[in-house]
Image (spheres, rainbow, N blue to C red):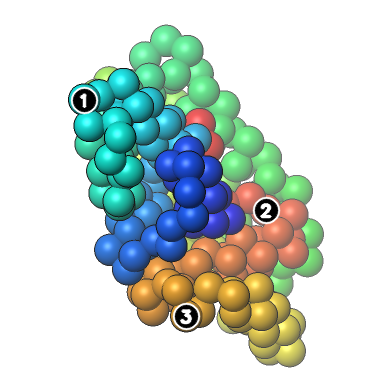
Amino acid sequence: MYYQTIEEFFVARRGDPLLLSNADWLLIRKWRKAGVPLRVVLRGVADALDGHAHSWGRKRKVGSLAYCAAEVEAARDRWHRALSFEGEAQSSVASALEAFADALDRATGLGAIGTRVAGDTTVSLRKWKNEAWASPSALGDMTARLVRAEKELLEAIRAEEDPAVLAAMLAQTDHDLEPYRARMPARVLDQIREEAWARGLLARHGLPRLSLFHL
């Protein structure tokens, strides 16, 4: 889990137990909503704490995850530059879009609406991969397109899914989140629940999330 991994990594690197504050959880939520990959956040946290360990103030414990925010943003900038859609990065993005299209071609158990939406999305993905992406801002544009495409696909799948299956998925997610209910702000819990539902619903049909998040 994105949130749990960041918490455990920060606490372990900090060196003694520390419960994250509401502000810390909301900061993680901000990174997650912005699509900052887990490995990028962990790199930024590690860089911040490594820097602190060699600073004049190293004897004073870091009291908040917010201390790492600047380094996480720096790590995110490096990731964006790596995805500037040139050379190998261009190839990586094109490969990801083709992989999404292939997965949609192989999807199982879709109803009539889901099949139609999946087919339309496949056509779009293969068209997008051949477009010229020449600037860092293109990453945001592509991400927005994928978010819209995934939302439409999820709505189609949900409309045709057995209500009992949807209820069971939600119940399992709530059960998994129970240990965090008293520790996380409601907005964070809602986001995690929504992401778990989307991931689970797509996985039932052999589909991945339509996201460049892991590149």
Callout 3 secondary element = loop
Which image quadrant for residue 175? bottom right
Q: Position of residue 145 (x, y in %)?
A: 37, 49
Q: Label 1 to label 2, Cα distance in Å? A: 50 Å
Disc number lying in front (1 or 2): 1
Residue 128 seen by the camera:
no
Q: Earlier in the sequence, mark 3 or mark 2?
A: 3
Dot 2, crowdedness within 10 Å: few (<14), some or many (≥20)?
many
What amino acid is at disc 2? Leu
Seen at 29% across and 31% down, the residue is 58
Q: Earlier in the sequence, mark 1 or mark 2?
A: 1
Callout 2 secondary element = loop
What amino acid is at disc 3? Ala
Disc number lying in front (3 or 2): 3
Which mark, by number, is residue 182?
Answer: 3
Which image quadrant for residue 108? bottom right
Determine which residue is flagged by label 2.
207
User: Where is the N terminus found, in terms of image quarters?
Assistant: bottom right
Q: Position of residue 161 (x, y in %)?
A: 68, 80
Which mark, by number, is residue 56?
Answer: 1
Q: Nearer the viewer, residue 117 or 199?
A: 199
Q: Earlier in the sequence, mark 3 or mark 1?
A: 1
Residue 24 seen by the camera:
yes
Q: Position of residue 48 (x, y in %)?
A: 32, 32
